[in-house]
Amino acid sequence: MPSTQGKMSMENALIGMICDEDTVTGLLLTGAGDVDLRKRTNYLVVDSNTTLKDVETKFRELCARDDVAVILISQYVANMIRYIVDRHTAPIPAVLEIPSKDHPYDPMKDSVLARVKHMFAGE
C-alpha cells in the first residue's frame, strides 16, 4: 500500500484511541498502543477527571500526526467535542465512533453515518 501522508505506511500506521478505560485497556492488550520517542501516546483514557480541553487537545494531536490512520473514539466522548469531530473531513485519519459499555451507540449521532446519508440523499 503506498504511503498516503508523510511517512505513514501499512507497516507503521497507528490506531488512535480516545475512549473509556475498559475500551482502551482492551485495545492496548491487542497491541494497538504506542509511545513514540517524544513520549506521545496514541491513546487517551477518558474518565470523570478528564477535562474537555484534554479531549480536544488529544483529538487535534491525533489528527495532526502523520502516523495515525484511524481514530477510534467512544461516541459519548465524540459528543463532548462534536463541534470538532464534525469539522474533521479528511479521509486520513478516519474517525470512527464506537460504543462503550456504559453508553449505548446512537446511530443518529454518528458523524460518519450522517455524511453517508447526506451523500446518498441526493440520489
Image (cartoon, grey):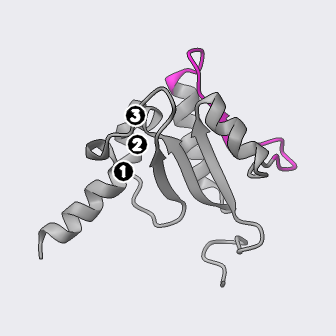
Residue 118: x and y in percent read 20, 62
* Residue sitting at x 61%, y 49%: 62
- Give, as a single range, the part of the protein colored magenta: 35-52
Q: Residue furthest right?
A: 37
Whole-angstrom CA distance, mark 3 to mark 2, is 21 Å
In the rendered structure, the answer to whether residue 121 lies left or right of residue 29 reads: left
The nearer-to-camera label among 3 and 2 is 3
- Quarter holding residue 19: top right
Amino acid type assigned to the residue bearing label 1 in the image: Arg
Q: Tags 1 and 2 in contact by the CB under 8 Å rule?
A: yes
Reply above or below: 91 against 2: above
Return the mark for residue 75. Answer: none
Reply above or below: 7 against 70: below
* Residue sitting at x 71%, y 74%: 10
Q: Is residue 82 magenta?
A: no
Crowd tier of the residue under label 2, counting other residues whose Cα lies within 10 Å: few below 14, some 14–19, many 20 or above: few
The nearer-to-camera label among 1 and 3 is 3
In the rendered structure, the answer to whether residue 88 lies left or right of residue 45 reads: left
Return the mark for residue 87. Answer: 1
Return the mark for residue 84. Answer: 2
In the rendered structure, the answer to whether residue 100 lies left or right of residue 31 reads: left
Circle 3 sits on which residue?
A: 104
